[in-house]
Image (spheres, helix red, strand yellow):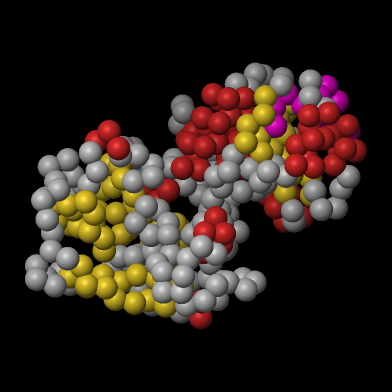
Amino acid sequence: MTLCLSTLSRGMRLSCSTSTSPISQVTAFSSKVFSPKGFTKGQYSAGIYHFSSTTTLNQDKMQARKFVITKHFQGLPKLSDFNLVEETLPALQDGEILCKAEWLTVDPYMRAASDRLKVGDQMPGGQVARVLKSRCADFPEGTQVVANFGWRDLTVMKVPPAEKRGFDSIHAMPEMKGLPDSYALGCLGMPGNTAYFGLTRICEPKAGETLVVSSAAGAVGSLVGQIGKIYGCKVIGYAGTDDKIEWLKSLGFDHALNYKTTELPKTLKEHATKGVDCYFDNVRRTSLMRICVLHWH
């Protein structure tokens, strides 16, 4: 009986070719949370934004572009909620690097995070970026990095000491072995690591056990369910729309249920006949958590 609470979730639709590693045998889902219409520089790619910058570098004056919020969201985000502005970057100092964005993330958490932003603040987010200029030996020019630079094309960063680098600062791009670079922000990045290690190290699933996943159509939840199937679990996933339910079934979930239109105790009694061995929570849905506890095996 194991409970794993995940507060990390990311919406993206990524497909991943198979290999011997479970983390590379899964696919992640995303609703189209952001429309590219009107963004003239870049190409939208299902929850990850490919930024094609034409900014000219000048040693004396570097102009970066960044997305800032013009007002807090009401309903779905609109283009009028953002503005693309320019910013003059400082000259590079010792220990600093200049990076150019290649992939930006569009994340569900950004709605909540934006409530803490002031009008004119830059949108946060992860990036796959390439080092254009470097005065840091650990990240020479041409190196790809993953960092939380936000929605901007160029970034100057003072590189922290090696012992302080990590997911919340900067790290070198892992070896992708032929997979798309964008996967470093999705199923091979934070969402994938959350799903894989949360399930395999905390829940420690065993073949034949029953795994319940909330927000199962999210980037983390969809990976959890698929990894659970690889480990031989019976997987029950909950999501909030019928199209998500159909998509979860196509991923191989044993049971996919709309929590808005079903009775949670009844569905677990019907489908978790031997009880629940592991509940992987992505949304802190206390009602489902309590029901799962009552049905723990």
Q: Which of the two residues, 153 or 291, is positioned nearer the viewer here?
A: 291
Q: How many marks?
A: 0
Q: Is residue 275 magenta?
A: yes
Which quadrant of the view contains residue 200?
top right
Q: Residue at x 83, y 27 (%)?
A: 295
Q: Residue at x 68, y 43 (%)?
A: 284
Q: Main secondary structure of the magenta part?
A: loop
Location of the N terminus (image quadrant): top right
Whether residue 249 can be seen here: no
Question: Is residue 44 rendered to the left or right of residue 228?
Answer: left
Residue at image position (52%, 76%) is 71
Q: Whole-percent x and y of residue 30?
A: 58, 54
Please state the extent of the stretch shown in magenta in the rendering: 270-279
Is residue 37 shown above or below 246?
below
- Residue 28 sits above or below residue 18 on the image: below
Residue 188 makes an appearance in the image: yes
Residue 14 vertical placement versus 270 (above, below)? below
Could you say which is closer to the camera, residue 30 or residue 70?
A: 70
Q: Which residue is painted at 22% across and 59% down in the image?
A: 156
